């Protein structure tokens, strides 16, 4: 069972990213809220704030690798909680 889950974690995690390369703040948003977050990100960028977006497409397994990788580079580092 664990081998199967590890395989799924490596092959089935789907997400989109936008502007995370230079982001000081990264928003993680799913579903309908992601559209609102994208609009907020674009407005923040226009105002000179380096904001990026990670939009998980799959929630199981959760795209924790990209989030952990990105949060190490971001200046505003907040903990995330899966609800």
Image (tube, rainbow, N blue to C red):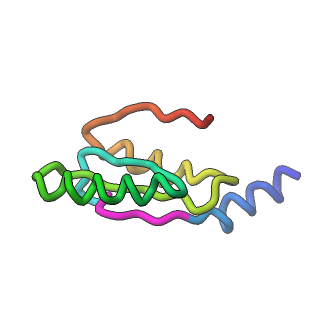
Residue bounds of the magenta highlight: 15-20
Q: Is residue 23 left or right of residue 13?
A: left
**Coordinates of residue 69 in the picture (x, y in percent):** 43, 50
User: Which residue occupies the foreground of this view, 20 or 29?
Assistant: 29
Q: Is residue 13 left or right of residue 19?
A: right
Q: Is residue 70 left or right of residue 14?
A: left
Query: Which residue occupies 43% across, 56% down?
Result: 54
* Residue reaching furthest to the right: 1
Q: Main secondary structure of the magenta part?
A: strand
Examine the rendered structure and indicate whether residue 38 appears above or below residue 70: below
**Coordinates of residue 61 in the picture (x, y in percent):** 68, 53
Query: Which residue occupies 67% across, 68% down?
Result: 11
**Coordinates of residue 21 in the picture (x, y in percent):** 28, 60
* Residue reaching furthest to the left: 48
Q: Is residue 82 left or right of residue 70?
A: right
User: What is the count of numbered marks?
Assistant: 0
Examine the rendered structure and indicate whether residue 27 appears above or below residue 80: below
User: Is residue 57 within the magenta segment?
Assistant: no
User: Which residue occupies the foreground of this view, 28 or 43?
Assistant: 43
Query: Which residue occupies 26% across, 51% down?
Result: 51
Q: Quadrant of residue 19?
A: bottom left
Query: Which residue occupies 25% across, 39% down?
Result: 75
**Coordinates of residue 45 in the picture (x, y in percent):** 18, 56
Q: Quadrant of the C terminus?
A: top right
User: Which residue occupies the foreground of this view, 69 or 76?
Assistant: 76
């Amino acid at each position: 069972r664990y081998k199967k889950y590890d395989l799924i974690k490596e092959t089935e995690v789907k997400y989109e990213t936008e502007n995370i390369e230079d982001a000081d703040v990264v928003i993680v948003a799913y579903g309908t809220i992601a559209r609102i977050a994208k609009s907020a990100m674009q407005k923040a960028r226009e105002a000179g704030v380096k904001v990026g977006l990670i939009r998980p497409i799959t929630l199981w397994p959760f795209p924790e690798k990209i989030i952990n990788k990105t949060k190490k580079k971001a200046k505003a580092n907040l903990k995330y909680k899966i609800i």
